[in-house]
Amino acid sequence: MAGRQIYNPDGFKNIEKDGKIVGFQCEMKAQYYRGITLSIVRDIKVNVDGTDYNREDVRLSVNGETFTLEEMRTVIDSDYRWEFGDYATVSVMTEGGLTAGTHHIKAVQVIDPSYMPFQVEAVCEADFDIK
């Protein structure tokens, strides 16, 4: 049986701003059985090809808005939910982005539902190509 598709295979790309590559992004689904408010997301750890990226450099975009991980802790507006089955864009701001070619991503989604006595961590790995 094939695993559930976590990453959008077409969602991996470098981020360009004012003619410069300022980072990279991917599109991924929340690994929780229901939609979640952004305020319960505690971390999205991103590792590509063995390199861990700083938490401060990670952004999440949903419903047309982009938030840092710290900003997400204060978002209580129900318009900004990461719905089950929907892709959100995870961006990592790093000068030069990623080189063209095949890469391996390992991301860990950490959420803290108020009704559970522990945080939930989901590891998401895949190979992808940057063109």
Image (cartoon, rainbow, N blue to C red):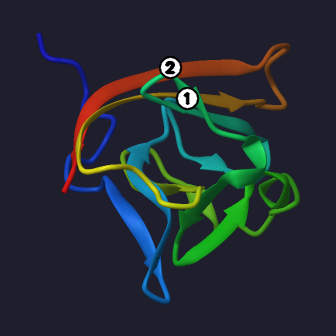
Q: Nearer the viewer, residue 60 or 77?
A: 60
Q: Residue furthest bottom?
A: 18
Judge whether residue 11 can be spotted in this image.
yes
* Quarter of the image that includes the C terminus: bottom left
Image point (52%, 38%), residue name: 34
**Residue 14, x across and y down, in percent:** 38, 62
- Kindly state the secondary structure of the residue where label 1 is placed: strand
The residue singled out by tag 2 in the image is 123
Dot 1 or dot 2, earlier in sequence? 1
- Label 1 or label 2, whichever lies nearer to me, is 1
Q: Quadrant of residue 68?
A: bottom right
Q: Nearer the viewer, residue 118 or 104?
A: 104
Judge whether residue 79 can be spotted in this image.
no
**Residue 31, x across and y down, in percent:** 48, 31
**Residue 42, x across and y down, in percent:** 78, 37
Q: CA distance from mark 1 to mark 2?
A: 16 Å
* Quarter of the image that includes the N terminus: top left
The amino acid on which the numbered mark 1 sits, given as a three-letter code, is Thr
Relative to residue 128, is residue 77 depicted above or below? below
Relative to residue 10, is residue 122 depicted above or below? above
The residue singled out by tag 1 in the image is 51
The amino acid on which the numbered mark 2 sits, given as a three-letter code, is Val
Q: Quadrant of residue 127?
A: top left
